[in-house]
Amino acid sequence: MSELAGEPVRRRELAGEPVRRRELAGEPVRRHELAARPDTGPFAALLATPGVEEVLEVRSTFGFLAFHGGNLERMTDVVAVEAAARAGASVYAVVQPPDLRWHLPSTQVRPEASPALARFLDHVSVTVALHGYGRAERWTSLLLGGGNRRLAEHVGACLAEALPDHEVVTDLDHIPPELRGLHPENPVNRPAGGGTQLELPPRVRGTTPHWADWDGPGLPPPTEALVDGLARAAATWPLG
């Protein structure tokens, strides 16, 4: 799901440049041994790392997740928080600081390590988990995995209308297996009604050079359209 996997990585911050607008590339990398404490697991160790923040807003029972947010899968937390605010939905995010990129597999993001995540998952009935990915020839392809296929189709229809210049993929056979998000221990599948995992390429997140000089107002146009589509999906989903 992330462009970078494995042990924690800290990167030097680009001076004077908002990290949220540009992909970091080419700068030196410093690797650190941030060992997970065996009694709490790697997710608890990540949350205990200086500069890492959790975001929780409890509203409706439709939820948005972005637990690879901040400097890891950039802009996923920004999109999730903004879409939730516009739709009156709930949201949980983990925001990594500018000098940290620590990718944990989704199955290691466990509610036992975070009271905030546990509260979110107990409250929502369905959720959309936002992730970032990068693949050649898929610069404008949004991939909708996860166990709740009816929700995937609903979100996909809203995104296709909001982003007519992008490809919205809901057929699991056309999504790489490692990006399908079907494992039952993936947080997206833990709510009572399950959820859909949305993989976002860099361009729609506004992190490519196309938008490096964007000064607003608001988010870059494709990212703004993405937020609107997600908010409409949340607002029009029937909640029991």
Image: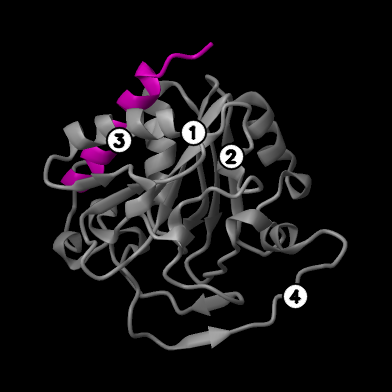
Looking at marks 4 and 1 on the same chain, the residue that comes earlier in the sequence is marked by 4
Q: Find the distance from the CA under tag 3 to the CA under tag 2.
A: 17 Å
Looking at marks 3 and 4 on the same chain, the residue that comes earlier in the sequence is marked by 4
Q: Amino acid at mark 4?
A: Ala
131 on left or right of 136: right
Q: Nearer the viewer, residue 56 or 103?
A: 103
Q: Main secondary structure of the magenta part?
A: helix
Q: Which residue, given by chain and number where applicable, does mark 1 sit on?
A: 148
Residue in the picture at 33% in, 79% down? 25
Q: Amino acid at mark 1?
A: Asn
Label 1: which secondary element: loop
Q: Amino acid at mark 3?
A: Gly
Check if mark 2's residue and mark 1's residue have beta carbons within 8 Å: yes
Binning the other alpha carbons within 10 Å of mark 2 as few (below 14), some (14 to 19) or many (20 upward) gives many
Q: Which residue, given by chain and number where applicable, does mark 4 sit on?
A: 35
Check if mark 4's residue and mark 1's residue have beta carbons within 8 Å: no
Magenta stretch: includes residue 228: yes
- Whether residue 237 is visible to the viewer of this picture, yes or no, is yes
Write the start and end of the magenta stretch as one range. Answer: 219-240
Q: Find the distance from the CA under tag 1 to the CA under tag 3.
A: 12 Å
